[in-house]
Image (tube, helix red, strand yellow):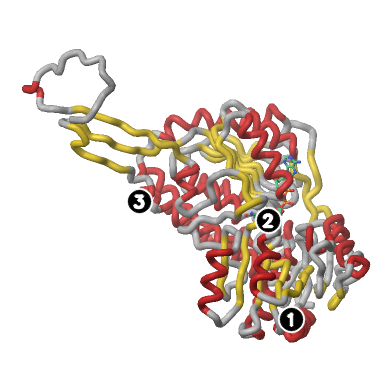
Amino acid sequence: MTETSTPAAGPISTPVVGHWIGGKHAPSASGRSGPVTDPATGRVTRQVAFADTAEVDTAVAAAKEAFPAWGGSSLAQRTSVLFAYRALLHQHRAEIAALITAEHGKVHSDALGEVARGLEVVELACGIAQQLKGELSTQVSSGVDVAAIRQPLGVVAGITPFNFPAMVPLWMFPLAIACGNTFVLKPSEKDPSSSLLLAELLAEAGLPQGVFNVVQGDRVAVERLLEHPDIAAVSFVGSTPVARHLHATATAHGKRVQALGGAKNHMMVLPDADLDAAADAAVSAAYGSAGERCMAVSAVVAVGTSGDALVEKIKERAAKVRIGPGTDPASEMGPLITAAHRDKVASYVRGAEAQGCEVALDGTGFTVEGHEDGHWLGLSLLDRVPVTADAYRDEIFGPVLCVLRAETYEEGLALINSSPYGNGTAIFTRDGAAARRFQLEVQAGMVGVNVPIPVPVGYHSFGGWKDSLFGDHHIYGNDGPHFYTRGKVVTSRWGDPSEGARGVDLGFPQHD
Ligand code: NAD
């Protein structure tokens, strides 16, 4: 096996990954920490600080202090920082990707893709002036104009998952700070280091101290952010149970909340589809990043006669996927995030036959020579999966693809729409009318037509339906600036002074 040719992990040399508060590194004072593991070796490489309530309060206080000046700064001042940040992210993208691979395990090319998709939102934020233009109506009444403006909220928090340690924070803070807010990020404790590199680059880009802060930690830090009186809004991306809890708790404390949750993404394949293209797409979207993507295709719905041939084609392709350390350029799929998660995913495959599934590929028990302690799992394919099987009902979040069979389009659609999740979905077909019908009838927030992972580009918003999102706003795109600002309508009278005083009138104001 070829060893790494990618850059060594970034500038963080301390054994404890700490916080970033008020524009500088802040070592932990809580005495609490957790291990950070290299998933490819199973070795603990760092510790990560777990903030206590006082440390969260310090970060929020720094953000609060920075808000008046930053919120009042000009659009030109804010966007000049973001343009500089974009250039720095480009320059350091390999370094960020190396940190992601070292702690998450995904292959380097995939980590680079994650940085590129995060950069899209930075680019959107560079053009924030366009999105914050507001509205003006002149002469709505004699001498009266009405202007609608949007203003920042204050201090906002972002709480992010392990599976995209750079991209998901980048979905949030560039737009939040471009809109004039200050920000406190609580990254996943499983892969915390890239958040500090993102913070260092913001400082290098010229962001004033305190505008962006990072508190590392677990649920103690999260709970404090949810109840903190100085936090105006919370963006969350993670699993459905936590998203549901977080939405309920933070809204009960009067905060604006967008909480994106988990998923079970279905890909419907009609009999007229190009089955080779569909099989390529299913394998890429199911097993990329070891299935640890919220937009992974985890259920293929094979309609009519497409099933047997499709399963054969998926099986052929899956058998050829090269699994190994993310630092090896030959690897296409890396390890899973933790040994415990690997074992949980494997348990779904081991229990599948007893629950009525046909195990077409069994990836359990797989290992990589020389890296036996890594969190490895091979690719698993379960066919003729009943909707009652745990492997179908749960978001497994691993390299396990379920194939379900449906006689007709209607049966397949009903199956997809009965899922409690509604994140992404896709249809593969050559029939434009069927694809159009699917777009209108399927209950999901993001739909692909012959595209398996329909993650919208930065200038369209990302978000699911049903248990995949709690709150009113999707993330980035037009919804991002809307979430991070609140509206104000200003009605002004600047009539001709020669018209003189209008006199007292106790009636409700009307327009003349
Ligand atoms: P997670 O819900 O376990 O953790 C997310 C964040 O919440 C982390 O920062 C974690 O420290 C914190 N957290 C965990 N448990 C908590 C608790 N009980 N109380 C308060 N905070 C808590 O998610 P994860 O395992 O890190 O990420 C994988 C999940 O995220 C999957 O379900 C995946 O589908 C989802 N996800 C969704 C999207 C989306 O856009 N919808 C994107 C990426 C990931």
Residue at 65% from the left image edge and 67% from the top image edge: 413
| Local secondary structure at mark 1 | helix
Percent coordinates x, y for residue 186 in the rendering: 65, 42
C-alpha gap between disc 3 and disc 1: 48 Å
Quadrant of the rendered image containing residue 358: bottom right
Q: How many marks?
A: 3
- Of residues 355 and 183, the one nearer the viewer is 355
- What residue type is disc 1 on? Gly
Category of crowding for the residue at label 3, using alpha-carbon neighbours closer than 10 angstroms: few (below 14), some (14–19), many (at least 20): few
Vertical position of residue 5 compared to residue 250: above or below: below
Name the residue at the right extreme.
Answer: 354
Quadrant of the rendered image containing residue 276: bottom right
Instruction: Name the mark on residue 421.
Output: 2
Q: First in sequence: mark 3 or mark 2?
A: 3
- What residue type is disc 3 on? Gln
Placement of the C terminus among the 4 image quadrants: top left
Residue at 35% from the left image edge and 38% from the top image edge: 149
Residue at 47% from the left image edge and 32% from the top image edge: 67
Q: Nearer the viewer, mark 3 or mark 2?
A: 2
Placement of the N terminus among the 4 image quadrants: bottom right
Are discs 3 and 1 less than 8 Å apart at CB? no
Quickly name the residue at label 3.
Answer: 130
- What residue type is disc 2 on? Tyr
Instruction: Name the mark on residue 24.
Output: none
| Local secondary structure at mark 2 | strand
- Of residues 108 and 256, the one nearer the viewer is 256
